[in-house]
Image (cartoon, rainbow, N blue to C red):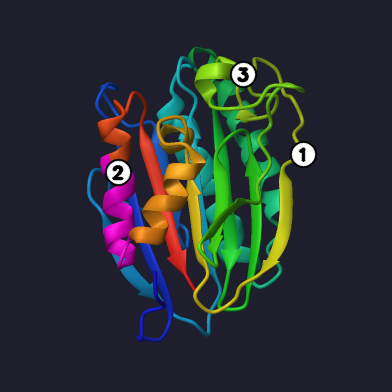
């Protein structure tokens, strides 16, 4: 996939129910603003400014997963807006965790709600990423796909959620009493033409990394890539909600 000629950071996102779930418990935001569901959205992000991408996945089987993902996105987004350019993604994610447990304390019917999250504070030269749970971040560079986030799963367990029974060792919320969390985080230098993918396990459970790599390598544009990833997920049954963000620097 070639770098577009237009200036700025190319951005495209999608969040949908999939083919089995009755509703969407994922939440995706750019610069603190949640995006609409069930349609591909694209824009260009100003190259001279910094931006925030957050993808949260309400945990299936837990009460009010959709609320957990919304709270996660809202708290992280609010802290980003108020603390730029000194935003700290680890502390923001931990603040979201505390906010979810506070909500549970105020309403016992919400006990156990939780979410996984992946995101990045990004500009044209650097990506400061963070994640908690099994939502993932990848970079596609030189026709090769590399996962840079950490899957918080039980030791010795690998593969898709089908093989690890949806077990995760850390999440935003997800318990009955406050459990402190330590998100994974790091910094990547962004090279011109790099393609970054942030997604929930609704994509990675259905489409293996090798196929994601192939689809990105064969796509002629960011829009083609997003459509190909959603189509491949649906062809493999799309049993979960699917959310993804593609960024090209």
Q: Quadrant of residue 152?
A: top right
Is 224 a magenta residue?
yes
> Going 26% across and 32% down the picture, which residue do you hit?
235
Whole-angstrom CA distance, mark 1 to mark 3, is 17 Å
Identify residue for label 1: 182
The quadrant of the image that shows the N terminus is bottom left
Comparing labels 1 and 3, the label whose residue is closer to the camera: 3
Which of 87/152 is in front? 152
- Residue 240's label in the rendered image is none
Q: Earlier in the sequence, mark 1 or mark 2?
A: 1
* 67 shown above or below 141: above
Would you say residue 49 is visible in this rendering?
yes
> Going 52% across and 85% down the picture, which residue do you hit?
48
Left or right of 148? Residue 69 is left
> Going 49% across and 17% down the picture, which residue do you hit?
62
Label 1 element class? loop
- Residue 167's label in the rendered image is 3
Residue 221 position, x and y percent, is 31, 67
Task: Tell me where the magenta segment starts and ends, as one range.
Answer: 219-231
Would you say residue 112 is visible in this rendering?
no
Q: Earlier in the sequence, mark 1 or mark 3?
A: 3
Query: Is the magenta region chiefly helix, strand or loop?
Result: helix
Label 2 element class? helix
| Callouts 2 and 3 close, C-beta under 8 Å | no
């Amino acid at each position: 996939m070639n770098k577009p000629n237009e200036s700025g950071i190319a951005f495209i996102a999608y969040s949908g129910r999939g083919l089995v779930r009755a509703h969407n418990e994922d939440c995706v935001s750019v610069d603190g603003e949640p995006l609409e569901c069930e349609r591909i959205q694209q824009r260009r992000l100003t190259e001279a400014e910094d931006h925030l991408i957050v993808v949260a996945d309400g945990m299936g089987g837990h009460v009010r997963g959709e609320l957990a993902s919304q709270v996660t996105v809202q708290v992280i987004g609010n802290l980003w807006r108020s603390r730029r350019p000194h935003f700290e993604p680890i502390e923001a994610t931990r603040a979201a965790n505390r906010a979810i447990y506070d909500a549970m304390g105020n309403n016992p019917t919400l006990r156990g709600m939780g979410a996984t999250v992946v995101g990045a504070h990004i500009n044209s030269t650097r990506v400061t990423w963070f994640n908690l749970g099994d939502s993932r971040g990848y970079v596609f560079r030189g026709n090769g796909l590399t996962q840079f986030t950490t899957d918080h799963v039980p030791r010795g367990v690998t593969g898709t959620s089908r093989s690890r029974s949806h077990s995760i060792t850390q999440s935003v919320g997800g318990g009955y009493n406050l459990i402190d969390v330590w998100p994974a985080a790091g910094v990547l230098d962004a090279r011109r033409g790099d393609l970054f993918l942030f997604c929930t396990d609704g994509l990675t459970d259905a489409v293996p990394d090798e196929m994601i790599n192939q689809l990105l390598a064969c796509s002629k544009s960011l829009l083609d890539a997003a459509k190909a990833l959603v189509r491949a997920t649906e062809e493999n049954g799309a049993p979960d909600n699917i959310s993804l963000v593609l960024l090209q620097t």
